[in-house]
Image (cartoon, rainbow, N blue to C red):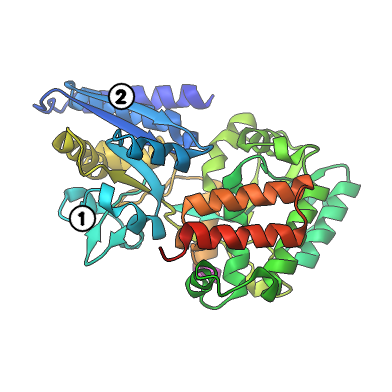
Amino acid sequence: MKKLLCALLTLAMLLSLAAFPAVAEDAAEINIFISQPEYADAMNTLIAAYKEVAPNVTINYETTQNDYPTLLKARINAGTTPDIFSTTSGKEIADYAEYSYNIANEPAAKAMDPAVATMMTYGDGEIHGFALKGNYFGLIYNKGIFDEVGITVPKTIDEFEAACEKLAAAGYQPVTTGFAEWWVYKHIMQHFVDAASDNAEALVGSFQKGEAHIKDYPVLYDNFFRFIDLCVKYGDNKPLETDLAGEDSAFGTGKAAMMVGQGAWVEADVLAIDDSIQIGFAGYPVTDNPAQSQIIGGSDQALRINKDSKNLQAVLDFVNWWYTSEYGQNWFCDVAGVIPPVTGAKVADMQIIKQGVELSAADGTAPLSICYSSDSYHQAKGEALQAYIGGSLTKDECCAQIEAKCVELDGTK
């Protein structure tokens, strides 16, 4: 269904392009290598549309999620840096600055939402990235199941455990986790990091210097691990074998009542399974204080332009068209179904996004603290937590490994 919808949208939007002449672009080849495979169909639709505008430009698109940071670094080290590649925003903007082009003077940068541009800024006003989308992160739940069982959205860690018990007693799998994916853990843990300190960025910096320890922060040592343990207890039969597709299936079919580690990007795939499902969205229950149950908003991923690209002008033309043309701006809503990272674009009529906007206005949003660390660290952290879940690391051993990797990979070199 999702592919059919994208095909129909492609046809409709390509017809709208017919009224515009093709760009007199010299023959060029653009190589894109990014994470976020959940947007593969939408990206291919975008590329097909640009082919109508610039027929002499060939765009080769490749995407993966697992081990992406390692694969990207291997390509950079081999001298085959893609023309467009992805990293996280925030800390990795600086980490990869030497390889990326400063787009501050490009039309795309001027079209970018200021909140997104802030996450892409490096040095004295340089902008070293653009975003595929904005995002909301939070707890996803099935409103129909919650109503049937008679539970409200859990806002404290005790309420979360009680909800899981009641859902299990009613015959539902309380939660699906996707714990086979390393990046799921960073999406969950950031909520606890935000709750552990009034200054999450400074806290992360302390861990990177080796000055802070998980055991000294009960929200991390007690609550976060309790949450992970509850998700294992009340979650998938084989949590370390359940990936994003498994989560989509468990939640979309009504087997599982809650989904963790995900955000607005899952909605299209869930609705492709059951287009009548009523999706709820809320902050994570991180402490015994309901006020700390907040969603997180922002742009966590940056797309970067290789400053040494052999076809730099062709790449810039593509990105500027994407961010400033009517088609490109409408693509975010009409095809990708994401929060547009550009000003003035319409917002997708999606349940999670609408609730995210409402929750943000009512309760504010917590900091996007995953961006204070690199994805190399987040991957190592995810692998340590997988070892903990699998039983090969104790809780204290897991914490020690996470702390050591934080210093090794993100500490001051």
Q: Residues within 10 Å of mark 1 (few under 14, many from 20)?
A: some
Instruction: Assign the C terminus to one quadrant of the image.
Output: bottom left
Q: Residue at x 63, y 30 (%)?
A: 273
Residue 315 picture location, percent across and down: 21, 36
Mark sitting on residue 79: none
Does residue 259 appear in the picture of this structure?
A: no
State which region is magenta: 361-366
Residue underneath mark 2: 48
Q: Residue at x 64, y 74 (%)?
A: 291
Q: Nearer the viewer, residue 300 or 166?
A: 300
Upstream in sequence: badge 2 or badge 1: 2
Mark sitting on residue 110: 1
* Picture quadrant of residue 132: top left
Q: Nearer the viewer, residue 327 or 59?
A: 59
Q: Secondary structure at mark 2?
A: helix
Q: Secondary structure at mark 1?
A: helix
Instruction: Assign the N terminus to one quadrant of the image.
Output: top right
At label 2, the amino acid type is Ala
6 relative to 186, above or below: above
